[in-house]
Structure formats: structure tokens, C-alpha cells
Image (cartoon, rainbow, N blue to C red):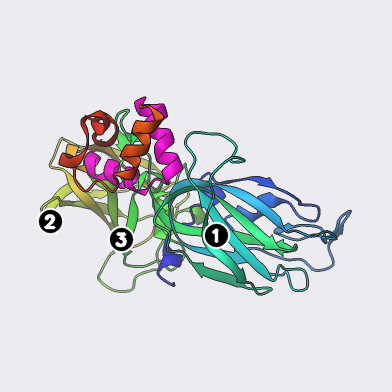
């Protein structure tokens, strides 16, 4: 479980998540569920609706049933763990919870979605982070939190692995290391002040706290972070952003790639960096890489890392197959009817033929969608 909690929170407001519905939020707003910051509490602070809570809280239920809230993930993906955090809800927390998921094509309300269980109805404790593992191998775009029968939840964390829609990556050069496109942090030397996942988060940092910062080194070494790209590709524009890091930016950086056959490939030679600056380096066309390692000298902080380029045909095929194989059945049928133009009966038949194991096994009618060819 612990390793899953290091995966990004796909529901976070920082990644574009949104609470799209709740059947009741009389005491505290539903939007608090996905606030990136940890919940807080100030005792004896009362508003017109009672004690102010940093979370979502429904009224006391006087009829049969339960309450629920629906969250659109900022980054769709495979959910590995859910945390229902009831911090500071001591006498008003739900004693049981459950979580469902769905995969929706396009941008629409999920009222008629086909929901499937991620976390079965389970006990929950008050004033604590309740952790639940998830073993469902399907791509999720929305989750629905049910609380039984009512009460308050401070935060909902949905930890998982991003599974991007490859159609969004076919329009030209893309950020191959971005979290929302399927990039990931593999390892780093130090994460004392903040997470290296911040480096590949969406948007520009708005403070030093939204970047990655290491402890001060007192030896002769240097700090580093290693990324997996969304799929093998050729990087043409590298961005190393030290915005907001004024007195603690690295003095220099070096970037190395891992080729598709495992060899080390120089991407950017050791280069001096300025504080509080978005550095952009245009790179010559080089071999494709599947990973990047950024070494900073000797330590310090950085706001963002971007690696714009293009997927290789093999990388595009890898990404397309994983995405299609992980789509829920209803979403796969919708894609085949809406994007490919197949009759519903043909879409049903092809959906049932999953998983497709290799690019050579992709039917001709699906090749443009899955392989980008």
C-alpha cells in the first residue's frame, strides 16, 4: 500500500481535478475534497452554518439512504489506492464509505455512466487518513465517493498511474515527460522539502513550494531526479525552470537520456543555470529515449522540467495499445462508434477481442486510432 501512496493524486485540483456534483453540502463545500494542501482546523470558528470545516460535510440525514460526491479526475488513469481523509471530523465522520469509478468519453456529466466498484463498502475511522487499495485494471475518468449515511470528509486522494488519451498526443510536439501525458518520476536523490512529482505537474509554479527542492548538501556529490517518458520519443526542446528559486537554485544542470536499447545518451551537457528563470534549450535531432535523468549541481530547487518532442512509431503503438486495452467496456464501445465510425455491432465485437497484444495484431480499421498511422 505504501508504494501506491507515492503515486500522483489523480484527483488533485493541482492537476485539474474537479468536484462536479454532491447531493448535499450544507455544512462544508464539496470543492474542499480535492484541495492539494493538507486539511486544517481552527476551533471555535463558527459561520451561519455552524463550525467551519476544511472538507465536505453533509447535513444529518433523517431519511434512509446515503450521501455522495462525484469527482472528475484531473488526470485519467488506473487507480491503485484511495485515501478518504477524515481529519478533524471526530463526531461527525461517516462510519462507512465506498468508491466507484467510470470511464467517460469526452466532456459530459456522468449521470448515465456505467459505474464499477473500486473500493467496496468498508469501515472508516474518524480524524484519520483511511487507506484503501484498488486492484481494478481499467482507465478511470471519474470517481464517486459514497458515505454511509452522512457526515464529513476532509480530503479524497486518488493515487494512480496516468493513462493519457493518445489522440491528444498526435497533434504535434508534446511534453513527453509531463505527468498528465503519462510521464513519471522513477527515483531521485533527495526529496526533503518537496516532491519531485511537482517538476512534471501541469501549469507554471506559483510559488517555490510548488517545485522540487533538496536539502543542502555538505559533501562532494550532487542531486538528481530520473523520469520515465510517456513512451519512447525524440526530445527537441528541453525546459529547466527555476522560477521562484532565487537564493537556492542549482548552479548548473546536466541531462542524460536512456536509449531504447538501454544505452546512455547525452541530451544536454553540463550548463550553468540562473535563479528564477525559465531556461529553454533547443536540441538537435538525436536518438529516441525512454527515460531522462536531470543532474543538478550541487543541490537546490527547480520549479518545472519539460521535454517537448515526438513519439517514435513504436512508442505511439505502445501507448495506444495500453490505452485501448484499459478502457472500460462502455467507453471502448463509445470510442469505436464515435471516433472510428463503426456500427455498434462491430464495436461490440472488437471490444470483446481485447486485449490486443501487439501492433501487428491491430485490425486495419483501428490502426489510425491505436497506432497513429
Q: Which residues are magenta?
A: 316-341
Residue 249: give x, y in percent of width and height.
39, 55
- In the image: residue 60, left or right of residue 273: right
The first of marks 2 and 3 along the sequence is 3
Q: At x 30% / y 29%, what residue is drawn?
A: 172
Q: Which mark is residue 262?
A: 2
**Where residue 281 sits: x, y (%)?**
26, 38
Main SS, magenta region, reads helix
Between the C-alphas of marks 1 and 3, the distance is 21 Å
Label 3 element class: strand
Residue 101 relative to residue 139: left or right: right
Q: Nearer the viewer, residue 253 or 311?
A: 311
* Residue 269 is at least partly visible in this image: no
Which residue is located at x 67 percent, y 45 percent?
A: 21
Q: Residue furthest top?
A: 341
Residue at screen point 60% across, 37% down: 109
Q: Which label's residue is closer to the chain start, 1 or 2?
A: 1
What percent of the width, then of the height, locates residue 241?
A: 38, 45
Q: Are marks 1 and 3 in contact (CB under 8 Å)?
A: no
- Which residue is farthest right? 48
Q: Quadrant of the N terminus?
A: bottom left
Amino acid at each position: 500500500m505504501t508504494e501506491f501512496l507515492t503515486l500522483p493524486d489523480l484527483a488533485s485540483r493541482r492537476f485539474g481535478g474537479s468536484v462536479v456534483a454532491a447531493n448535499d453540502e450544507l455544512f462544508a463545500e464539496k470543492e474542499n475534497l480535492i484541495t492539494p494542501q493538507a486539511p486544517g482546523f481552527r476551533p471555535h470558528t463558527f459561520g451561519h452554518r455552524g463550525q467551519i470545516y476544511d472538507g465536505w460535510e453533509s447535513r444529518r440525514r433523517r431519511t434512509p439512504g446515503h450521501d455522495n460526491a462525484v469527482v472528475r479526475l484531473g488526470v485519467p488513469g488506473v487507480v491503485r489506492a484511495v485515501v478518504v481523509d477524515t481529519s478533524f471530523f471526530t463526531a461527525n465522520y461517516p462510519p462507512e464509505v465506498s468508491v466507484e469509478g467510470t470511464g467517460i468519453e469526452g466532456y459530459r456529466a456522468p449521470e448515465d455512466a456505467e459505474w464499477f466498484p473500486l473500493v467496496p463498502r468498508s469501515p472508516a475511522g474518524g480524524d484519520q487518513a483511511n487507506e484503501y487499495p484498488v486492484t481494478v485494471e481499467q482507465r478511470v475518468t471519474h470517481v464517486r465517493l459514497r458515505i454511509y449515511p452522512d457526515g464529513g470528509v476532509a480530503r479524497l486522494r486518488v493515487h494512480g498511474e496516468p493513462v493519457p488519451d493518445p489522440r491528444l498526443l498526435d497533434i504535434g510536439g508534446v511534453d513527453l515527460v509531463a505527468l498528465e501525458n503519462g510521464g513519471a518520476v522513477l527515483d531521485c536523490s533527495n526529496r526533503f522539502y518537496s516532491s519531485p512529482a511537482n517538476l512534471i505537474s501541469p501549469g507554471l509554479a506559483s510559488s517555490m513550494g510548488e517545485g522540487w527542492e533538496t536539502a543542502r548538501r555538505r559533501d562532494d556529490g550532487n542531486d538528481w531526479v530520473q523520469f520515465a517518458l510517456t513512451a519512447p520519443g525524440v526530445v527537441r526542446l528541453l525546459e529547466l525552470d527555476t522560477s521562484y528559486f532565487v537564493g537556492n537554485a542549482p548552479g548548473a544542470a546536466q541531462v542524460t537520456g536512456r536509449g531504447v536499447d538501454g544505452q546512455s545518451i547525452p541530451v544536454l551537457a553540463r550548463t550553468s543555470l540562473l535563479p528564477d528563470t525559465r531556461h529553454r534549450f533547443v536540441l538537435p535531432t538525436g536518438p529516441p529515449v525512454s527515460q531522462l535523468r536531470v543532474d543538478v549541481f550541487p543541490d537546490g530547487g527547480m520549479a518545472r522540467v519539460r521535454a517537448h518532442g515526438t513519439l517514435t512509431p513504436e512508442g505511439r503503438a505502445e501507448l495506444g495499445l495500453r490505452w485501448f486495452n484499459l478502457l472500460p467496456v462502455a467507453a471502448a464501445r463509445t470510442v469505436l462508434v464515435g471516433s472510428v465510425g463503426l456500427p455498434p455491432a462491430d464495436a461490440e465485437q472488437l471490444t470483446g477481442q481485447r486485449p490486443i497484444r501487439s501492433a501487428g495484431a491491430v485490425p486495419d480499421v483501428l490502426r489510425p486510432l491505436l497506432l497513429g498511422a
